[in-house]
Image (cartoon, rainbow, N blue to C red):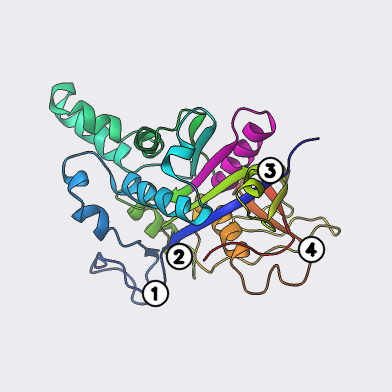
Amino acid sequence: MTDSIVISASLADAANQDFLPPERPVADAPFGPFPVYYLDHGAAEADARTSRGRHTRVSHRLDRMIARVLTQAGLSRAAIAGPRTGLISGSHYGCSQVFEMHFRLRRKGPRGVDPVSFAQATHNYPVSAAAIEYGIEGPCLAAVSLEAAGLDALQIAMDWLNEGRCDRVLVAAYEDFAPPIADHLSARAQSTPGKAFGEAMVLLLLERERDVLARGRAGLPVITAVHSAPVDPPSSDLIAVCADEAAAPTFSPRPLDFLGAGGLLAVHDLLHSPDVGHRGPEHWQIAAAASAGSGVVARIGIRQMDLCT
């Protein structure tokens, strides 16, 4: 019998509309709510490892969040080292440094680009840097796709676990709005009244239930299914209700559009919601829809909430 897959830890950093973005809008920008909201990257900028080129702001945040997730799950760094731990990230736009580095490459040529900086600009760098730091030797992947990227990553992680490729997977989803992505999103938002985008990073730890029980933890949420599905009617909304009358209730999203991180952020919000998991067994559905109309649906079984905040 296949072991149940549980979410043993969950963390999220998400931009908040209550705070102004660090950049001032251009003079001809419309007055009113800002269309793009940023995370606070001060910790990354102040870290000496960033100034030495060891981290980007995305890899720095992922590094810190993994440490916090391990504490929440009751695991040591040594416990996740080796081939039985996997790591995957999902993002709609990936790392903005890719665009900046290719611009520099075109302007200065190959000899004008630092090879280490070029490596950091690739989409897989946050995952690769974390794998090196924590000694993760299992399957690692950086998925860059549509708005359902976070749930795409969750689906792949479930496949790895069900196929026996590893015993636990760290699943991350993020959006980084460094230029030129911020300019593009501002234009998108201004063409759609009421539209606003936010940076985020979400991290879940998936484990086999038997391993979690061996550490003395019980009652954790079970992922009962993750699968691709059409979303009807097609919608650009990040979280959409699937056209299945028998489906479990769908958890409401945050007001900002977090793009590829939105689906995983909704999972995190579900697990930490005061309205969920205290009335006995429940099943909830989260659907991240791409603009083309397809999407990924995750069904979460909540038996009794036992997650740390």
Disc with the residue nearer the chain's start (2 vs 1): 1
Name the N-terminal-most of marks 4 and 1. Answer: 1
- Residue carrying label 2: 196
Q: Residues within 10 Å of mark 1 (few under 14, many from 20)?
A: few
Residue 213 screen position, x and y as percent = 66, 49
Q: Which residue was labeled with disc 4?
A: 281
Point out the residue furthest to the top here.
Answer: 111
Q: Residue beneath label 3, please?
A: 210
In the rendered structure, which amino acid carries the disc numbered 1? Pro
The type of residue carrying mark 3 is: Arg
Label 4: element kind: loop
The reply to whether callout 3 and callout 1 are in contact (CB within 8 Å) is no
Mark 3 crowdedness (10 Å alpha carbons): few <14, some 14-19, many ≥20: some
Marked residue nearer the N-terminal end (2 or 4): 2
**Residue for badge 1:** 33
Q: Is residue 258 left or right of residue 99?
A: right
Q: In what element is the residue under mark 2?
A: loop
Pointers 2 and 1 in contact (CB under 8 A)?
yes
Seen as rendered, the residue at the extreme right is 246
Looking at this view, is 172 or 219 the one in front? 219
**Is residue 122 depicted above or below 237 in this figure?**
above
Residue 65 in picture, x, y percent from top left? 41, 52
Q: Give the spatial CA distance, label 2 vs label 1.
A: 8 Å
The magenta span reads: 147-172
